[in-house]
Image (cartoon, coloured by chain):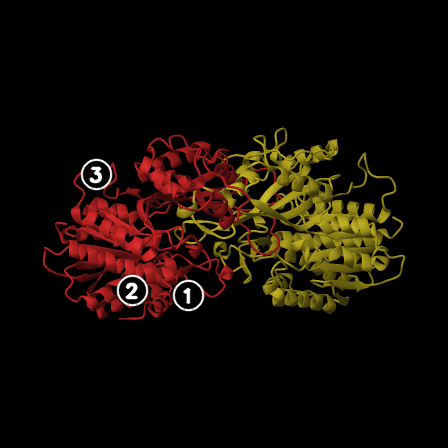
Chain colours: A yellow, B red
Amino acid sequence: MFDPISALKDFIRHPSVSADPAFREGMHGARDFIAGLLGRIGFAVEIVPTPLHPVILAERTGPAEWPHVIIYGHYDVQPADPLNLWTTPAFLPEVRGDRLYGRGAADNKGPLLTHVAAVARLLERRPDLPLRITFMIEGEEEIGSPSFPGFLAAHAERLRKADFVLLSDTGSPREDQIVITCGLRGLVLFDLEVTGARTDLHSGLHGGVLRNPIQALAELCASLHDADGRVNVPGFYDDVLDVHAWEREQLARFGQSAEEYRAFLGIPAFYTAKGFTPFEATRFLPTLEFNGIGGGYQGEGTKTVIPSKAFAKISCRLVANQTPEKIRALLYETIAQRMPKDVTFRLVDQHSGQPYVVVPPDRSNTPAGQSPVLASAFRAADAAITEVFGRAPLYLREGGSVPIIADIKRVLGLDSVMMGLFLPEDNLHAPDESFNLNVMRKGMAASERILEGVAVGGRRS
Amino acid sequence: MFDPISALKDFIRHPSVSADPAFREGMHGARDFIAGLLGRIGFAVEIVPTPLHPVILAERTGPAEWPHVIIYGHYDVQPADPLNLWTTPAFLPEVRGDRLYGRGAADNKGPLLTHVAAVARLLERRPDLPLRITFMIEGEEEIGSPSFPGFLAAHAERLRKADFVLLSDTGSPREDQIVITCGLRGLVLFDLEVTGARTDLHSGLHGGVLRNPIQALAELCASLHDADGRVNVPGFYDDVLDVHAWEREQLARFGQSAEEYRAFLGIPAFYTAKGFTPFEATRFLPTLEFNGIGGGYQGEGTKTVIPSKAFAKISCRLVANQTPEKIRALLYETIAQRMPKDVTFRLVDQHSGQPYVVVPPDRSNTPAGQSPVLASAFRAADAAITEVFGRAPLYLREGGSVPIIADIKRVLGLDSVMMGLFLPEDNLHAPDESFNLNVMRKGMAASERILEGVAVGGRRS
């Protein structure tokens, strides 16, 4: 059995930023590292090429009557900038107190290694465990998994015979309150680029005769929300469904006060859609966010220029029953209508992803004919989490997106059991990302019990 | 006599970007280059230290009855970014056709060298010329000349005995229509930084609960203009004076149509304050421009982040009778009132400069008691330009700012004769800056005649 913490440090040392071609070597290193580890604990490892970053498939096969779990994870990470805000370098992992710091520590290298370590320990203890396990680890999650649907389609024949997917790429509010995520938001991303004059201009010689593209962009961006915190795009909320009573009841047990949340974020006040608490807003409502903006001079001091171009990077989160295609069309139409006519603009598609919802067993609205192995996995997870973490899990939708969960459902027909292992203070996608090592240890114990429970339950459960 | 074009190439090769401390060596090189050149043509050169970049003072002294001209220029240049938009590297000067390309070619190394070469030729021809000449060449013009007022005050005793200032740091519309600039806009610059959460946030986990600082910044920026192209800040236009009839008459002879100007800028339509032509708007009205904006992720692909901070770099151009102090106060008050209360913000002062106006002689509203040497310089310039360029100069206010012209008036009591030598297609402050070598040659001839005319006119003229 390997040491999971030192393995996690080794994993983080490979800077696997999938968004930036400069990190090709880091991607390669991270892939080789995790593939090698899975090989050493007895898995048959395959590196499956895709148009961009390969997928790792690692299998423990067995008789068809054994239940079959796919464990999903990703070896790529977000860019680490702004680098100057990290206490220690993003790709030089360091343990401080109960935490391991480094880009990818919590998203997703730590949680993924938690399951790998659980499997290693379980198979050491029970080499004859009647459970088929397939690790499916991709390298494009942080850029929207462009190759993953194609990969799934190409391997659907073999993968769709599995029973369910287990993963930890979602969050929980506290170390003693684990969430099993039952829904994820979808995504639509695009860039908006505005052009004024054909070149940068001297702001004195030409200031006062043309609309600055930064002004046009600001006017457009300012028009996309209303004073009540809602997205101001006609039709944006049309397909949003009402929330189930059991979901509101679960969320009420969330255990964080709005004031605690506000203090955690460090904001003077919330800006939430009217009629929704902050906790509801992130889970039950779609959003439109500005991920980046740029144009003109951004350096030291001043440059008296009217820039030729300015751009914004915009993303929407979607909830169940919305589709990226429709939302993208609504947005593009609204932008085209509102953009001042004395500038030109361009919309550049970035990736998108469908929202996802699964209903845990024994809820009043559990879909008929839910897979018995899926139901047994949910029950094993409930029992394992309750015992290891000391409190029953909450079943909640989450504000984040793992678009491939919807792809897996659509292409393979499989649902996912998502055990949330990262915490709000883990700083995902931000400087000083870290993973709580207590959560890692407990997560390993829980994962081990879940897998053992599913194996014992068999395929008929 | 040195070769002016090869000297200009050597001058440009020193990357003297005053805004960026990384270019310390380029600043040093440019300073040494021009100081050396002035020494070789017989001037007594002094490098006067300031808190930032030194000023070069080079003198040709003589009896007190000789007229005394100060020739102003600056050896610093704008930053060259975006570097990728230059056809050839910014600091590797290249002649293509009638133009010399490189950062600073037109602003201000070319025009400055035009006067240096004219002086060199004139003194070769008339070594006994009864004219005192002082070159005063600073290195902070592109960053607002922070040290210059202090320099002027420290050397006022000696400099205020001069009769007038001659310079070329303004523009003309065409090679055959030189403008003598009679007014310059003032400047107020500042940065606006908006902060949302204490750190960058995952846009899925937290999207929908807080106002994105990019949104707050966009809303604020969008509020600063109205639909009629006017700056939407209460009191902004209060001190703007009516335009003189002779100024409108001069501008009417400007010789470029609005359509030509629009095509030159490459914009679909103008966005000009109601009631003003584009040519009037840049000269007679104040403006508010966004010189830069930034925040969040600006790299390749996507990063689903809610940034902690976003900023804009904002500048205003002021016209005669406005003051930077009052306009800055109005802006800061307006921003504080309008900024959403669920974010925090910070205003960072950058430099500022007073507007300037001089009335050429023989206008109905020429100020009483105008210096006879100044009047003779204006008349010599009118004659020289008419003869060399083939057309009488126009007397116009310009949209640009040379704040030190107002400082010179305030501290030394001297007015300036500004012969515009750069053209719209010279791409000042932008990629592919260049200087028209025909203008350089004619400018040299004109400068030579102006200086000779002032010398001949004597101090009583």
Determine if marks 1 and 2 fall on one subunit: yes
Amino acid type of the residue tagged 3 in the rendering: Pro
Amino acid type of the residue tagged 1 in the rendering: Phe
Residue at 50% from the left image edge and 63% from the top image edge: B87
Q: Is residue B264 left or right of residue A121?
A: left
Disc 1 on helix, strand or loop?
loop
Q: Is residue B82 left or right of residue A225?
A: left
Q: Is residue A53 left or right of residue B238?
A: right
Residue at 73% from the left image edge and 51% from the top image edge: A404
Vertical position of residue A38 compared to residue A324: above or below = below
Residue farthest top in this picture: A275
Chain of the residue on which disc 3 is drawn = B
The mark that comes first in sequence, 1 or 2, is 2
- Relative image position of residue B6 (x, y in whole percent): 35, 70
Chain of the residue on which disc 2 is drawn = B
Viewer-proximal residue among B282 and A171: B282
Count residues near mark 1 (Cα–Cα under 10 Å), then give few for <14, some for 14-19, many for 20+.
Answer: many
Disc 3 on helix, strand or loop?
loop
Chain of the residue on which disc 1 is drawn = B
Vertical position of residue A232 compared to residue B404: above or below = above
Determine if marks 1 and 3 fall on one subunit: yes
C-alpha gap between disc 1 and disc 2: 15 Å
> Which residue position holds label 2?
B31
> Which residue position holds label 3?
B367
The mark that comes first in sequence, 2 or 3, is 2
C-alpha gap between disc 1 and disc 3: 44 Å
Residue at 16% from the left image edge and 40% from the top image edge: B369
Q: Which mark is residue B158?
A: none
Amino acid type of the residue tagged 2 in the rendering: Arg
> Which residue position holds label 1?
B91
